[in-house]
Image (cartoon, helix red, strand yellow):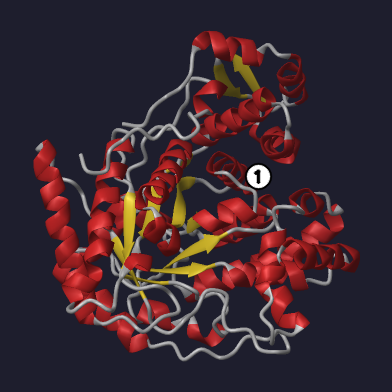
Amino acid sequence: MAETLSSSASDQAILASPGVTELLQRVASSIRVENGAVRLVDQNALRSSGIDALVREAVFAEDLDLRDTARWVIGEVGAQLGVIPSSIHDLYIARGQGKVGGFTVPAMNIRAATYDTGRALFSAAVELDVGALILEIARSEIGYTDQRPAEYVAVLTAAAIKEGWSGPLFVQGDHFQVNAKKYAADPEPELRAVRDIVREGIHAGFYNIDVDTSTLVDLSRGDLDAQQEVNYRLSAELTAFIRRLEPEGVTVSIGGEIGEVGTENSTPEELRAYMDGYVRSLAALGEKTGAKLAGLSKISVQSGTTHGGVVLADGSIADVAIDFDTLRTLSRLAREEYGLGGAVQHGASTLPQSAFDKFPQMETAEIHLATGFQNIFYDHPSLPEELRKRMYAHCETAFPEERKPADTDSQFYYKARKKALGAFKRDLWDLPEENRSAIRGTLREQFAFLFRTLKVDHTRGIVSEHVKTVPFSRSGPSALRVKAAADDWDLSD
């Protein structure tokens, strides 16, 4: 069960502090906090200005009481408006049972200007009646974009409120990955770090988690089972860990991965070796506690893409020869033999526009999209050139290791610029509204294109039919706080 760290006395002190009192007075025409509970006063006033004030404090307030109160209020009012952190597990299992299909869920990594990007996304989703969408952030992105899970959930909830979207909010921990070099040097600290981010994510509302231990596949070992053994064993152990943390009534959607993105294409034999070993390992873990543990809902495979694409000397992206037959075969195998939602495609956002309609045709369960949205920001004419130059200069001084000897400036900037987003988060937020609006407009067009092409338009009804939302409420702002490095769970239990 997910832990709650709060006390009524602590919350009363927080809500009575001067900074918090001033914030609540500013948004009093939108919401009121009375007797420790949030009451929505005027939805129009909230969308007009109240949510903007709340989300800014949720991100930038230096006073932790002020920050956590803003995040708490956003979560509470979001739940009242139907924006509820949820798991997509049941929808994917329904797909594995042949009850739904014909669409591919976009899982979108929001790295830059998350509130504005989220607004563009939800604006398009409202127009197209989209319910099947995932917002995600990877373990590495949490660091270089300076977005911890609680902030990420609050900002995306606020963006949905601002644009009038409601429904199960699928927030996903993407690539909660074991670093192979750190694992080889000393396994336990690296596994502890993954468990810590899992705990923090679930506490914040990440009810969808992609466990990535594919970095530990050892192709030098004799047969496929041996090659995948560490991968499937740790995937099962992390699954058991997640099941012990998930809130009552929620089955966290968990994804596994059989091969690192950017390596050789996956095969049916590899998928079976991983899944058979995973099923055995999870069953053995369940037997120790007398519980039948729910397994994966999807499986990530490699079919020819790379994260961010391959950058040419002029900064353009090389064409990718994606193997759609591999996707179709592995998606069908995952559904028919293991009851999963299907295969997942990573590294898709830099593919040509003409490729996206093929994913639903192949019955791909999910595709991950990230770099393309970041590129829109960096390359947009409404991003001031002065700011762009400062961000690039920061890359040169802070991330020189990203430059290979033969790299052109264009190649270096393209690879390194994602790491500047956290340092310039406030600069992007503080752009004039005219600039922000123009960028949102371009992003909105891209999101609408993807929603239509991936056939997730008009999926709100399908999601509502198969996904049960669990009431999301916290006792007060202090309940958002988790103990740092508080992981005292034993994976072998």
Residue 240 vertical placement versus 370 (above, below): above
Q: Say left or right for 118 vs 482.
A: right
Of the 4 image quadrants, the one containing the N terminus is top left
Q: Which residue is mark 1?
A: 162
Question: Can I make out residue 94 in this image?
Answer: no
Q: How many marks?
A: 1
Of the 4 image quadrants, the one containing the C terminus is top left
Q: Furthest residue to the top?
A: 9
Location of residue 250 in the rendering, given as x and y in whole percent from the top left corner: 31, 40
Residue 339 vertical placement versus 281 (above, below): below
**Residue lying at 64% horizontally and 68% vertically, measured from the top left:** 373
Tell me the kind of residue under disc 1: Lys
Q: Of helix, strand and loop, which one carries label 1?
A: helix
**Residue lying at 45% horizontally and 45% vertically, measured from the top left:** 197
Residue 488 vertical placement versus 176 (above, below): above
Q: Say left or right for 315 vs 68.
A: right
Location of residue 369 in the rendering, given as x and y in whole percent from the top left corner: 53, 68
Q: Say left or right for 387 vs 476.
A: right
Q: Say left or right for 294 vs 261.
A: left
Observer-nearest of 447 and 209: 209
Location of residue 343 in the rendering, given as x and y in whole percent from the top left corner: 32, 71
Question: Can I make out residue 251 in this image?
Answer: yes
**Residue lying at 46% horizontally and 35% vertically, measured from the top left:** 485
**Residue lying at 68% horizontally and 39% vertically, measured from the top left:** 59
Classify 10 Å Cα crowding around label 1: few (below 14), some (14-19), many (20 and above). many
Q: Residue 402: which quarter of the image?
A: bottom right
Location of residue 365 in the rendering, given as x and y in whole percent from the top left corner: 35, 69
Q: Furthest residue to the right?
A: 386
Q: Furthest residue to the front?
A: 185
Observer-nearest of 232 and 122: 232
